[in-house]
Amino acid sequence: MFSPALTPLTAAANAPAFVLVCVACGFLAALVMDIPMSQEEDGFVPAYVAAAIVRRVPPAAVTFAQGAVAHHAAGALAGGLYAGCYLALSAALPGTVAVGGVDLLPHVLSTAAVAAFVYAFFAHVVLPRAGRRIYEERATAVRGQWLRSSVVFGAVIGVIVPAFATVV
């Protein structure tokens, strides 16, 4: 399972391919997030609120398909954010232990940062501004459910990026 990691030089040289792999991993992680989201009463509220912002309509006017598209697109974008974090950190931190196709320390830090961002951005920026009625009535429950889903997202990114990065 351990292999040479992308060094800052090779990561930069392979950056476009690495970013594409990370975007795909983000999309896959968002698909896996559907599992815990579907088990929660308000699990898809973040998807509806995100789609409502894009469409400039109230969350109640968003269809499930529109919410799913917004959610999975956000996952892909978060994968791109992971790639940017990883490339910046791998250039700044010395390479030590490699897991799959990535250096372990920049990978762990990037995974944690992106999972925390995914949670915090929705829970503390998007939800209060766009999901007003939801925010007033069920903010704590929605945030708790979103926290659990964000942890799943981080765990999936943490596992699949090293595996898929070996193809870069």
Image: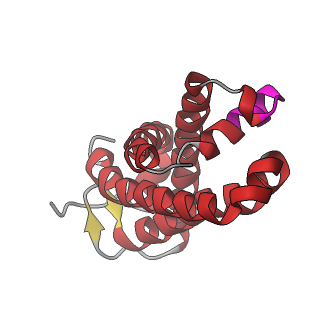
The answer to if 55 sits in the magenta stretch is: yes
In magenta, the rendered stretch is: 50-58
User: Which residue is outermost to the front?
Assistant: 137
84 horizontally vs 159: left or right = right
Q: Position of residue 161 (x, y in %)?
A: 35, 51
The residue under the point 37% across, 45% down is 35
The residue under the point 82% across, 28% down is 57
The answer to if 137 sits in the magenta stretch is: no
5 horizontally vs 84: left or right = left
Q: Position of residue 5 (x, y in %)?
A: 31, 61
Residue toward you, 36 or 115 = 36
The residue under the point 30% across, 57% down is 159
Residue toward you, 85 or 124 = 124
Q: Position of residue 89 (x, y in %)?
A: 54, 67
Please, which colouring scheme is shown? secondary structure
Our reading of the magenta stretch's main secondary structure is helix
Tell me, yes or no, if residue 14 can be seen here.
no
130 horizontally vs 139: left or right = right
Q: Is residue 20 above or below residue 112?
A: above
Residue toward you, 155 or 95 = 155
Q: Is residue 60 above or below residue 96?
A: above
Query: Which quadrant of the figure contains the N terminus?
Result: bottom left
Q: Picture quarter containing residue 113?
A: bottom right
